[in-house]
Amino acid sequence: MNPKEYSEKERALYSGHSSCAGCAMPVVTRSALASASEYNIVASAATGCLEVTTTIYPTSSWGVPWIHNTFENAAATISGVESAYKALSRKGKINKKYKFIAFGGDGGTYDIGLQSLSGALERGHNFLYICYDNEGYMNTGGQRSSASPFGASTTTSPAGTVHKGKEQWRKDLMKIAVAHNIPYVAQATIGNWPDMTMKFKKGIETNGPAVVVVLSPCILLWHIKPDEANTVSRLAIDSCFWPLYEVINGRYVLNYDPGKRKKPIEEFMKPQGRYKHLFKPENRHIIDFIQKRIDEEWEELKRRAEFDKAYIKSNSESEKQGRN
Amino acid sequence: MNNLKIFVDSKYIDNYETVLPLSGAHAVAEAMRQINPDTVAAYPITPQTPIVERFSEFVADGKVDTEFIPVESEHSAMSATIGASAAGARAMTATSSVGLALMFEVVNAASGMRLPIVMPVVNRALSSPINIHCDHSDTMACRDAGWIQIYSENSQEAYEHAILAIRLAEHPEIQLPVMVAQDGFITSHSVEVVRILKDEVVKNFVGERKPIHSLLFSENPVTFGALELPDYFFETKRQQQYAMEMALKYYSDIANELTKLTGHAYPMFEPFMLDDADVALIALNSSAGTIKKVVKEMRQEGKKVGLLKIRLFRPFNYELMKSMLKHVKTIGVLDRSFSFGANPPVFSEVLASLRSENIFSFVYGLGGRELYESQVRETFDNLLKGKFDAKINYIGLRE
Amino acid sequence: MTIKNVKKRWKDIPIGGVIVEPKTSLRNKTGNWRVQKPVFHPERCIHCMLCVPYCPEDAFIVEDGKLKGINYDYCKGCGLCASVCPVKAITMEDENVEQENDEK
């Protein structure tokens, strides 16, 4: 889907919601629904910004059947909807075909909803889970989550005189999702919209569970200007803070390699107020530490994708031969 | 069939299939097989486990065409059941004790979304200390969660109540979830003779679920679980209270329909040698059976004792309780749980039934709605006049 | 067009807090949040439509494959559209300046 095709589609998340000006989350959500517009969709959402800004009673922004249950159970809830669909289809009570998407923020996914997600992935329900990851608890005003990056100042990991923001490396949700041996896992961000929507489409068309983790900049937490969500998420890609890759049936595929144009992590951090304290001269070593670790992770990812490339190639060749 | 003749009145014998030696847990599983729900989400917990194990066997052998969801926790069991019920399916799960406590958050969500889920609960003590045996601290902790609660004396009742609960839950004017309680081990693991209805009889009695709003059947895309601010929350909650009032209204009709099939009665409160009793005990679940035996013995000794067994604890029929106890001089209420620092739950309700003159309830401020001085003044003025149409009144509700 | 939001009584709302009408948030005109306003310059537009998916408010008006303008009823003035436009066909201006001009 390109933006022109998108502009002609039914977009199913309507105007009049109350998310902050410049929030990336509606962009992620609406793009996901448009990517799945060929199908009848039922969506669930965890408690969070998406839920509170789109369903303030008595008005709803949703153009698809939608359910919010509680904070930690978007995946379990959609697994119930999907199971009901299977049973009702089997009994001939329903003829329409449906597909299922669960949305959760990072709090509802990495933290409180991790168990519910893990259970639903292991059970193999046919659904797409989209995590809009803004790297903190924004519905409650900007607390740290396990998705908050190292060094970031949040309201529960504030930059102070002793502690310099969050002191733990962020949890790798991709690896956790991959460990469930599900057919499709991908990482995306709004900074590369065609890549993101390609992943949504693949995810919705996957037979079985699929997870797409989307970096979704938050104006308030990241302390960026309302028009910066896209530029900052591009810097996340180019600095390899947020590499674009997929894991298809356990095999890693790198979607973008900035190569020599790879930017220093500082360029990603600089526009964001949550990292402001790290740019004091005495905190230079923290940025250096982050850079080192980002580089290590990036190299590891490249090695893994390179390794799997050979496998994917030989596999697709043998598949071709098999067909012949 | 010979066995049937021993255990079943000839008038009802055509409705029955067989008699089986079943534990309470397996009796409920048998009811679930006959109900054949669209989905069952299951998680093991002592002493509920035999329900989901037996039901899994039915799934494995193709005796039901239920979609079985083997979840990773009770929280997800209820979450998935909510999803399925909101989708338009007939959805069930079962739990016990700390499992019910873990799902407490979503137990409230189920009733709030008005989903007619039926959940057998095998009563077991809450931790800590950990204890796997029976008391009622689990279901009593959920007595204000917006679920109908039916308590069962034995396996036979647990079986029949599960079937009754489907109709009660799905009644168009009720649309509330129902817990069907039985005592852990005492009932759940003790084998008794259970009279089993024919599959067809149960199937016809429970019929098909006709959801009012649903994710998969509603013509327009519906939004479940929206954010309600102080401007609407109270009204939505008042509807839940109304649904409970409707449950009281329609309970007997539905129960009588089942009575016509089974030959057994299901009164909200069941009197046992109560008519001329000077002294009565009030109890629920299996202890009622024990008490009945003692009452019979003591009657032989010429002592005028009786029992009032509570079947329907939520909603609670205060007027009925009061009228049934009118002649009883001294009452003892059995509670198998604490309400620490306050009157135990069953005692509290019985007390409220009997001593409720000159005291009225005012529900206010739900979901953040303001209480104004003018409303306090108006309430005082009304109290000074001393006259209200209803026991429970509402301040600040859009009637 | 504004639909008056009459608060309903408890007997008159659907049960369970269910919202039975989809798309009803269209009643909430979020345009009054704006402090800055995107101005569309059709003469520069190449109709690549990149601004359309990037608009959090879905406030772009597209007709027959052409970008026609911005729906100010909903636009919150974040400026994401201007930031992604490759040809500067959208520029940001102060909202109040524009209003003053309108009044004149």
Image (spheres, coloured by chain):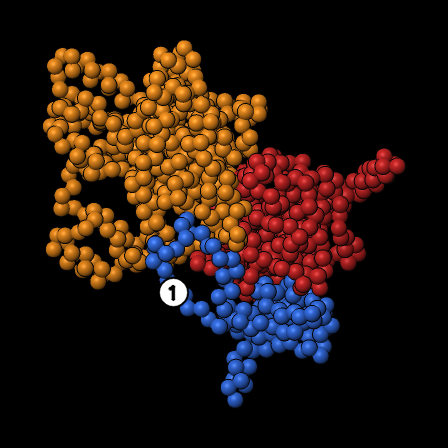
Chain colours: A red, B orange, C blue
**Residue at the bottom extreme, as displayed:** C104
Along the line of sight, the residue nearer the viewer: A96 or A84: A96
- Residue at the (75%, 56%) spot, across then down: A262
Tell me the subunit letter for badge 1: C
- Residue at the (58%, 38%) spot, across then down: A92
The tally of labels here is: 1
Quadrant location of the N terminus of chain A in the rendered image = bottom right
Q: Is residue B363 above or below residue B178?
A: below
Q: Position of residue C81 (x, y in %)?
A: 64, 68
- Note whether residue B274 is visible: yes
Q: Position of residue B235 (x, y in %)?
A: 34, 54
- Note whether residue A131 is visible: no
Quadrant location of the C terminus of chain A in the rendered image = top right
Q: Position of residue A134 (x, y in %)?
A: 58, 54
Residue where numbered disc 1 is placed: C6
* Residue type, mark 1 in image: Val
Along the line of sight, the residue nearer the viewer: A199 or B395: B395
Q: Position of residue C50 (x, y in %)?
A: 69, 65
- Residue at the (32%, 24%) spot, across then down: B264
Q: Is residue B330 above or below residue A163?
A: above
